[in-house]
Image: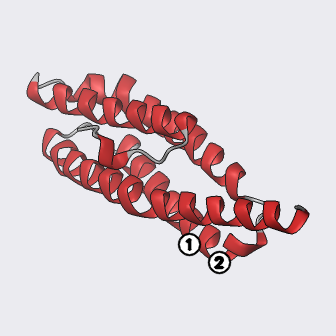
């Protein structure tokens, strides 16, 4: 699912995005193997923890840049909504149909979030850094 169009240009974020997509693929393998218990016992907790780690990485890049404060608040809200959805599934009873629906949501959300929200914020951060450099030059 990873492709060049999803690259943000920030290696740390791109590697983390690739890992999130790999976890999504692992969930899909659980469905294909008919193994929802593995998804609930291993993969969903991993997704939950890694997503929170990744979101903190993104948010820390943006905190302290007043020019992106409004966009940061919206971005954090997207993160929180996603984390809540993962937690709701993780704490529910293992269900293959529910997992299939979540995987569809997850794949669409990741591509949209990375391809649009993250890239838009990276562009704002780059512009903010250029503005700061120009002011000090």
Q: Does the residue at mark 2 contact the one at mark 1 (Cβ under 8 Å)?
A: yes
Q: Could you tell whether 11 is left or right of 60 in the image?
A: left
Relative height, residue 3 to residue 84 (above, below) = above
Relative height, residue 29 to residue 127 (above, below) = above
x then y, percent, for residue 63? 75, 59
Nearest to the observer: residue 31 or residue 132: 132
Q: Residue at x 75, y 68 (%)?
A: 131
Q: Splitting the image into 4 quarters, where does residue 53 fall?
A: top right
Q: How many marks?
A: 2
Label 2: few (<14), some (14–19) or many (≥20) C-alpha neighbours in 10 Å: few
Which type of secondary structure does the marked residue at label 1 adopt? helix
Q: Residue at x 39, y 58 (%)?
A: 113
Q: Is residue 45 visible?
A: no
Which type of secondary structure does the marked residue at label 2 adopt? helix
Please give the label number shown on residue 74: 1
Reading the image, the residue beneath label 2 is 70
Q: Could you tell whether 37 is left or right of 61 in the image?
A: left
CA separation, marks 2 and 1?
Answer: 7 Å
x then y, percent, for residue 97? 13, 45
Nearest to the observer: residue 99 or residue 103: 103
Q: Please, which residue is most extreme toward the front here?
A: 137
Q: Splitting the image into 4 quarters, where does residue 127 fall?
A: bottom right
Q: Residue at x 44, y 56 (%)?
A: 82
């Amino acid at each position: 699912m990873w492709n060049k169009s999803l690259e943000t240009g920030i290696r740390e974020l791109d590697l983390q995005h690739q890992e999130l997509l790999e976890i999504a693929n692992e969930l899909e393998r659980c469905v294909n193997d008919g193994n929802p218990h593995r998804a609930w016992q291993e993969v969903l907790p991993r997704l939950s923890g890694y997503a929170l780690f990744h979101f903190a990485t993104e948010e820390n890049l943006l905190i302290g840049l007043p020019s992106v404060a409004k966009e940061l608040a919206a971005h954090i809200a997207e993160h929180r909504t996603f984390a809540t959805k993962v937690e709701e599934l993780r704490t529910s009873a293992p269900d293959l149909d529910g997992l299939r629906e979540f995987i569809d949501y997850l794949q669409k959300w990741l591509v949209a979030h990375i391809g649009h929200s993250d890239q838009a914020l990276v562009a704002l951060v780059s512009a903010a850094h250029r503005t700061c450099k120009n002011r000090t030059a």
